[in-house]
């Protein structure tokens, strides 16, 4: 009875406690606000773009940003080598980055969850087989693997998502398996087994809820990583087709004009930095909140 | 100890077999390796002739056997672009990449160790904030973008360094800094948290209570213990450096393996890509093996019993 009452009291205070944690970590809060803003920009990109991101105009190509002497407010961040508006392209490019990151992580974590749980729960040969494949993929330099697969499959948004989803899955397998092994041998699962809980009950009530925290944390960092790698692939000309405005494709063009028109490379890069920053701050914060064991030392 | 050594060696060899299988199937992902290796405008007759010449018409097990027996002798076929044995070309390019990776690693360590030690020993100070900011920058700034920005500033505007090429000390500075940024952030974070942790260990308190001077405690007790953690991650970072060199060597026209990977992929020179992937993976596996051994040698607390 007493314990029950305490529990309920604890639960009632949960929102306040959560609010306190959110406000305590200023950096995490900043990351969250930044991330929400970026998602909003991606959704509202067509409405916010001052120009059609695909509209070429060779007469006004490589115009510098507005604060430059030769720049104008017509194109606040200037134009690229084909006269397309930089600001509009960066706004619309947010969509490619977030789409790849979101669906890539969704696929990778789903595969990781299924195989990681199977490996951790079944043990024995199943575990050995799954972990052998996992370790094999993880032993190949990641970027090399992605570049080779991308060049074999060809340029399309779906291919890019699938490539990141599958090549990133081993990481989630490893994390999930480790967590399952830890949870399985914990006191509360052992006592649940000892009072005759079914396998179904243990998986759905004990293992899955405890996996959410670590998976969500890894997912945030990996999503940031995929946005990085997508831009990198685009930079090498291996990501989405050149007709789609993406930060990577913009950087590839920027590289060719770095000598006289550095802004073509500067702004998409800044967009990547800001997005990545928001997700890293968010990830650090999630780790602190969801995984008290790994709390940072200060 | 010897049994541990033996099992690690066997494990590494098995892993290399796995990599070979992976490399074999990667170019067959779409089902038709001839089509992806030939130019897009190649005629069906040309593709058929190429398929025949490369042995792609043989049954898959026969192709696999052929590939494996060749690979075990270091023969990955001839590069389609260079018209020479793929393996030889890759090995010729290795020194330039190792040189650049080592330069990037040295740069990262020289900055990260002092920064991490200062930040970790004075948590909450301005130095600590700088330390954490560097850690964050390493994770959020893409190296290929940093490379472009440095070229724009230091090469084009200021004219301090050459924009590309390999020759003389000046030419390695920008590529090494760009490539070293990510490990720099990683090492800084790692050293900082390791120092924070070690500071509270009993042996450090004992050292202080013996009346040892601050710097002696740091050099003899804290740093030696932090270095164990560093060794474990330096080897792993080489995998990242090899990947990152694909961008950095392409941007700076550095004649190494990374740039060759990009060129081979663009030219659809897949025998060369296979050799490149195998050599890179072998290099990483070997480094991981050496890291594990170094670990045992450095830290007497680690003893692998059976």
Image (tube, rainbow, N blue to C red):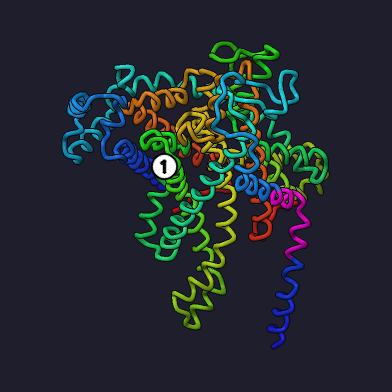
Reading the image, the residue beneath label 1 is A159
A30 inside magenta stretch: yes
Can residue B266 be seen from the camera position used here?
yes
Front position in the image: B69 or A208? A208
Direction bottom: furthest residue: A1
Q: Determine the residue positioned at 43% across, 60% down.
A: A114
Residue A272 visible in the displayed image: no
Q: Which image quarter: residue B71?
A: top left
Start-end of magenta stretch: A18-33
Residue A147 colored in magenta in the image: no
Horizontally, residue A112 falls left or right of residue A89, namely left
Q: Main secondary structure of the magenta part?
A: helix
Q: Which sits in the foreground, B252 or A55?
A: A55
Disc 1 crowd rating (10 Å Cα; few below 14, some 14-19, many 20+) is some
Q: Residue at x 56, y 47 (%)?
A: A223
Q: Is residue A159 left or right of residue B20?
A: right
Viewer-proximal residue among B253 and A131:
B253
Q: How many marks?
A: 1
Choose between B293 and A50: the one closer to the eye.
A50
Residue A220, x across and y down, in percent: 59, 50
**In the rendering, at what x and y percent does residue B269 appear?**
34, 25
Q: In the structure shown, which secondary structural element does the residue marked by tag 1 occupy? A: helix
Residue B168 image point, x, y percent: 58, 11
Quarter assignment of residue A152 = top left
* Quadrant housing residue B68: top left
* Residue sitting at x 37%, y 19%: B89
Which image quarter is the N terminus of chain A in?
bottom right
Q: Position of residue A211 (x, y in %)?
A: 54, 63
What's the chain of the residue with tag 1? Answer: A
């Amino acid at each position: 009875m007493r314990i029950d009452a305490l529990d309920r009291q604890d639960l009632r205070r949960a929102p306040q406690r959560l609010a306190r944690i959110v406000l305590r970590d200023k950096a995490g809060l900043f990351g969250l606000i930044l991330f929400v803003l970026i998602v909003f920009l991606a959704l509202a990109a067509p409405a916010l773009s001052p120009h059609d991101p695909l509209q070429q105009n060779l007469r006004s190509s490589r115009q510098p940003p507005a604060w430059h002497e030769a720049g104008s407010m017509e194109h606040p961040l200037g134009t690229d080598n084909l006269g397309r508006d930089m600001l509009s392209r960066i706004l619309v490019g947010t969509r490619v980055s977030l789409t790849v990151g979101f669906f890539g992580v969704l696929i990778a974590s789903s595969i990781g969850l299924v195989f990681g749980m199977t490996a951790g729960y079944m043990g024995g040969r199943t575990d050995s087989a799954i972990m052998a494949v996992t370790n094999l993929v993880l032993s190949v330099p990641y970027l090399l693997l992605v570049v080779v697969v991308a060049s074999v499959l060809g340029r399309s948004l779906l291919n890019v998502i699938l490539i990141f989803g599958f090549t990133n899955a081993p990481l989630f397998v490893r994390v999930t398996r480790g967590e399952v092994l830890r949870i399985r041998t914990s006191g509360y699962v052992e006592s649940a087994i000892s009072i005759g809980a079914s396998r179904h009950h243990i998986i759905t009530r004990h293992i899955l809820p405890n996996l959410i925290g670590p998976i969500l944390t890894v997912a945030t960092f990996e999503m940031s990583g995929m946005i990085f790698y997508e831009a990198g692939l685009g930079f090498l000309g291996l990501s989405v087709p050149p007709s789609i405005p993406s930060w990577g494709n913009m950087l590839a063009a920027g590289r060719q004009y770095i000598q006289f028109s550095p802004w073509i490379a500067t702004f998409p890069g800044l967009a990547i930095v800001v997005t990545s920053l928001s997700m890293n701050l968010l990830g650090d914060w999630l780790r602190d909140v969801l995984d008290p064991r790994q709390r940072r030392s200060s | 100890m010897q049994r541990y050594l033996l099992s690690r060696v066997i494990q590494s060899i098995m892993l290399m077999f796995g990599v070979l299988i992976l490399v074999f199937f990667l170019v067959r992902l779409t089902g038709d390796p001839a089509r992806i290796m030939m130019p897009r405008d190649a005629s069906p007759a040309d593709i058929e002739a190429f398929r025949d010449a490369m042995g792609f018409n043989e049954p898959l097990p026969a192709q696999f056997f052929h590939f494996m027996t060749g690979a075990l002798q270091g023969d990955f076929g001839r590069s389609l672009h260079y018209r020479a044995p793929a393996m030889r070309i890759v090995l010729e390019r290795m020194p330039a990449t190792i040189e650049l990776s080592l330069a990037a690693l040295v740069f990262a360590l020289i900055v990260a160790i002092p920064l991490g030690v200062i930040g970790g020993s004075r948590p909450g100070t301005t130095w600590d904030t700088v330390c954490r900011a560097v850690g964050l920058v390493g994770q959020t700034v893409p190296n290929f973008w940093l490379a472009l920005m440095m070229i724009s500033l230091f090469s084009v505007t200021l004219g301090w360094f050459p924009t590309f090429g390999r020759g003389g000390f000046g030419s390695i500075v920008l590529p090494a800094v760009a490539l070293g940024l990510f490990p720099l952030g990683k090492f800084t974070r790692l050293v900082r948290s390791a120092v924070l942790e070690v500071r509270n260990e009993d042996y450090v308190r004992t050292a202080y209570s013996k009346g040892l001077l601050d710097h002696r405690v740091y050099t003899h007790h804290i740093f030696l213990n932090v270095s164990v953690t560093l060794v474990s991650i330096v080897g792993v970072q080489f995998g990242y450096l090899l990947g990152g060199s694909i961008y950095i060597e392409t941007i700076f026209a550095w004649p190494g393996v990374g740039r060759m990977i990009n060129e081979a992929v663009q030219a659809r020179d897949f025998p060369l890509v296979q050799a490149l992937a195998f050599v890179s993976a072998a290099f990483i596996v070997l480094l991981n093996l050496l890291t594990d051994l170094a670990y045992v040698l450095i830290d007497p607390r680690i003893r692998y019993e059976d």
